[in-house]
Image (tube, rainbow, N blue to C red):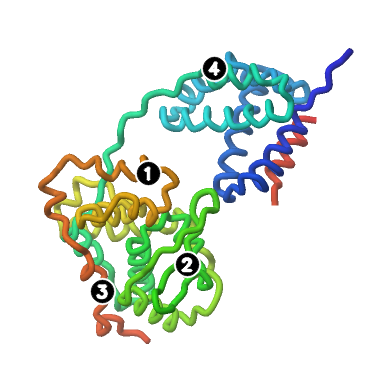
């Protein structure tokens, strides 16, 4: 008796039901999972020469997974961290598969037995108050674009937002009431409320007035479209290159949009803010993630970090102007 191949149906259910409806993954996370599983399927087909229409869950065996992980490291030059992430996604799929059909439990347990590689701890840079002042002084507020960039990066720092959270921020997420706050939708579609001070409120209101923004995304690029991650990275790098000339200590650091989030956390920490409060502010689901901000060995630098309340303020006189196609394609290729 021929056993029915349920690979395609489980794969489709994993994405359309489990990730979307049950786990409520964000679009970015969903796409990442889809990309990794497509990559593994392509590896089975192109490198191991298994015909696509003959692929089954039994091809997700330990041997194939380990050769795939070796392939992404050696041939694709992926880091150990990326390699581990791909393994986590494959394990997630197999865990779901065995919950649908218990016959796959051995596949899941075998995959789970593959050890994660140790990842070297990455140096986490942050900007001191003086460095941040130098950075923001490089933004020319006389120009429309400079004014927008100043407000955008101020919001990035003051809210400790991730880049994805910043570019998805909408006017309807901002509440100018007695205790003003911004509602931020983070990883796993988890919502958190980030309270903002009166100075930031005034800046956002003035910005919305100047740019006539009443609804939709808070920040739009020069094409009047939502910013991309690349666009925000480009803006940060532009002023970073200028700031390095004014503040030599920045030459020894890597400054990215995420640095603003790190800097906010470190400034909180230096000011004596309790770790659980920082955890809630940053939207970390696990306090162990927040604890990485304690791993700063240079006590002299820590002591030098001061409150940045007066760092991000604008001199008003300076502002002189008043579907799932990818999943369908993957499933079609397996028929």
Mark 1 vs mark 4: in front: 1
Residue closer to the observer: 70 or 291: 291
Question: Percent from the top left, x then y, of residue 166?
Answer: 44, 61
Disc sitting over residue 67 in the figure: 4
Q: Secondary structure at mark 1?
A: helix
The residue sitting at the left extreme is: 300
Q: Position of residue 247 (x, y in %)?
A: 15, 57
| Spatial separation of the CA atoms under disc 2 and disc 4 | 43 Å
Tell me if 157 is positioned left or right of 102 in this view.
Answer: left
Up/down of 31 relative to 309, above or below: above
Q: Distance between the Cα atoms at labels 3 and 1?
A: 31 Å
Residue count near mark 2 (Cα–Cα under 10 Å), binned few <14, some 14–19, many ≥20: some
Residue that mark 2 sits on: 221
> What number is the disc on residue 257?
none
Are the two marked residues, 1 and 4, in contact with CB atoms closer than 8 angstroms? no
- Helix, strand or loop at label 2? It is loop
Give me the residue at 19% from left, 63% from top: 307
Name the residue beneath numbered marker 3.
313
Question: Which element type, helix, strand or loop, lies under badge 4?
Answer: helix
Query: Is tag 3's residue or tag 2's residue first in the polypeptide sequence?
Result: 2
Give the Cα separation between the discs numbered 4 and 3.
54 Å
Label pair 3/2, CB-CB below 8 angstroms: no
Label 3 or label 2, whichever lies nearer to me, is: 3
Q: Farthest residue to the right: give it.
A: 1
């Amino acid at each position: 008796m021929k056993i029915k191949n349920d690979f395609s149906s489980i794969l489709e259910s994993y994405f359309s039901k489990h990730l979307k409806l049950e786990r409520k993954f964000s679009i970015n996370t969903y796409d990442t999972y889809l990309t990794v599983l497509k990559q593994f399927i392509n590896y089975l087909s192109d490198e191991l020469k298994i015909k696509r229409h003959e692929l089954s869950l039994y091809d997700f065996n330990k041997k194939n997974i380990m050769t795939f992980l070796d392939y992404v490291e050696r041939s694709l030059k992926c880091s150990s961290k990326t390699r581990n992430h791909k393994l986590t996604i494959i394990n997630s799929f197999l865990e779901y598969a065995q919950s649908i059909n218990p016959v796959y439990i051995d596949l899941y347990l075998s995959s789970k037995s593959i050890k994660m590689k140790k990842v070297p701890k990455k140096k986490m840079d942050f900007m001191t108050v003086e460095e941040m002042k130098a950075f923001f002084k490089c933004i020319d507020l006389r120009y429309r674009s400079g004014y927008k960039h100043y407000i955008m990066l101020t919001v990035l720092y003051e809210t400790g937002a991730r880049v994805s959270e910043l570019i998805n921020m909408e006017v309807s997420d901002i509440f100018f009431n007695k205790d003003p706050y911004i509602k931020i939708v983070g990883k796993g579609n988890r919502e958190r409320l980030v309270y903002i001070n009166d100075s930031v409120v005034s800046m956002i209101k003035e910005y919305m007035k100047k740019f006539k923004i009443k609804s939709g995304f808070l920040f739009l690029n020069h094409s009047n479209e939502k910013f991309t991650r690349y666009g925000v990275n480009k803006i940060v790098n532009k002023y970073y290159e200028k700031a390095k000339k004014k503040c030599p200590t920045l030459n020894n650091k890597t400054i990215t949009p995420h640095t603003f989030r790190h800097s906010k956390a470190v400034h909180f920490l230096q000011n004596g803010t309790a770790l659980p409060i920082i955890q809630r502010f940053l939207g970390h689901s696990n306090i162990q993630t927040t604890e990485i901000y304690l791993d700063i060995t240079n006590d002299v630098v820590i002591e030098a970090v001061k409150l940045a309340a007066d760092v991000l303020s604008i001199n008003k006189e300076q502002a002189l102007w008043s579907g799932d196609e990818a999943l369908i394609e993957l499933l079609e290729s397996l028929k």
